[in-house]
Amino acid sequence: MKVLHVETGQHLYGGAQQVAFLLRGLTAHDVECALVCPPGAAIGAHFGGSAVKVIETPCSGDADLGFIARLRRVIRHQRPDVLHLHSRRGADVLGAIAGRLAGVPVVLSRRVDNPEARAWVALKYRLHDRVIAISQGIADVLAAEGVAASRLRVVRSSLDPAPWQSPVPRAAFCAEFDVPEPAVLIGVVAQLIERKGHRVLFDALRALPDRSRVRVVCFGQGPLRETLEREAADLGETVRFAGFRNDLARWIGALDLLVHPALMEGLGVSLLQASAAGVPIIASRAGGMPEAVADEETGLLVAPGDAGALSAALRRLIEDPDLRRRFGDQGRARIEREFSVETMVRGNLAVYRELVGPG
C-alpha cells in the first residue's frame, strides 16, 4: 500500500507531531509513505533522508487555488492508493478537490472541535471518503453537524511516552524559570489565544485564599501574550510567561500540576504529555479533554469557563500532595495502556484498508 500524506503546517508540534508518529509507524508496517509539505517545514526536515519521500509543495492557505493543480500533479506522479489530509490550512478542502479530480480515495484527519455551519459541512465532507476524528468529542460534533456515520471514524491521538519520563531535577527547573524551590509548581502548555482559557485560570488564582507558595509557568506563544501579561500583572510573581519551548519534555515532569483551562479542545496532546510524565492534571470538561483526563483517576475535570470550580480544584490538589502523586502514577499507566503510537497507527491503517483492501 502507498499513502500520500499532506501536512501544511510549518512547525513540528501538535498535529504535525502526530503525523510524524503515524508515518514512522506506517513504514514499520511496510506501508510506503510520501509526504507533501511546504518548503522549509519542520516535518519535511524531520524526514529528510528517511524512507518517507518528502515533496515540498507551496500552499499559502485556503485561498491558494493553485494548490489544487500542484497537488494533483504530485498525485499523478506518485500514484498513491490513498490520499491522507492532515491539515485545515488549505489541505482539507483544496487537497480533497485535488484527490477527487485525480480519482484517489481521500481521508481527512480532524483535530479540532470548532463548530462549522451545517450547510458548509454538508458540502465539505462529501469530498472525503473517511473523516478520522482524533477524539470521540470531535466525532460527536461532526455527527451533530450532519457528517454521516458511514464516513466517520475515531482514532485517538497518541504519544511516545519515553521522552517525557526523564525530566530535569526540580532545582534546574526552578533556576531556569526563576521560581522558588518550595513553591507548588503549576504549568500551562497552550497557545496564547482566547479559547485556551488563560483568563479563567487568572480569575481562579485570584480566588485562592493564599497563593504565596504557588507559581504558574505559562508555556506557549500567541497573539494575546502582551494582553495576558497586562491582565496577569496584579498576580505579581505568581505567574510567569515562558514563551514557546521546543524542549518541553525536559521540564514538564518537574511540575507538581498541569492546568489546561481551555474552553474547547480537540483532545489536548499536552494533557497526554503531562500524564506520561506522571504529572496530575486539572482540565475543562469540554471537547475531547474528558478522554485525555480520567476524572478522579488521573486528574480533575471542571466546567469550562467556571473560575470558581477551577479555584476549588486548585485548592484541593495544592493542599494534597499524596493525591497529586496518586493521580500522576495512574496517569502514566493509562498513557501506556490506552494512547500508544502503535494503537493509533493500527487505527489509521484499518481505515485505509476499508477503502483499498488489505494491501
Image (cartoon, rainbow, N blue to C red):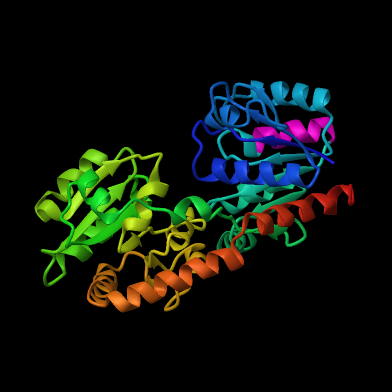
Horizontal side of residue 127 vs 62, given as left or right: right
Q: In which quarter of the image is residue 124?
A: top right
> Where's residue 3, x and y in %?
77, 38
Q: Which of 89 and 280 is in front in this view?
A: 280
Q: Which residue is drawn at 38% across and 67% down?
A: 280
Q: Which residue is drawn at 10% across and 63% down?
A: 212
Tally of numbered tags: 0
Q: Residue at x 56, y 40 (%)?
A: 16
> Where's residue 265, x and y in %?
46, 56
Q: Can residue 79 be seen in this view?
A: yes
> Is residue 273 in the magenta section?
no
Horizontal side of residue 47 vs 215, given as left or right: right
Q: Is the magenta stretch mostly helix, strand or loop?
A: helix
Q: In which quarter of the image is residue 32?
A: top right
Horizontal side of residue 223 vs 327, given as left or right: left
Q: Quadrant of residue 350?
A: bottom right
Q: Which of 292 and 30 is in front in this view?
A: 30
**Considering only vertical position in the picture, is 5 above or below 292?**
above
> Is residue 97 in the magenta section?
yes
The residue segment tinted magenta is 93-103
> Where's residue 182, x and y in %?
17, 62
Q: Can residue 299 be seen in this view?
A: no
Q: Quadrant of the N terminus?
A: top right
> Where's residue 115, x and y in %?
52, 54
Horizontal side of residue 215 vs 243, given as left or right: left
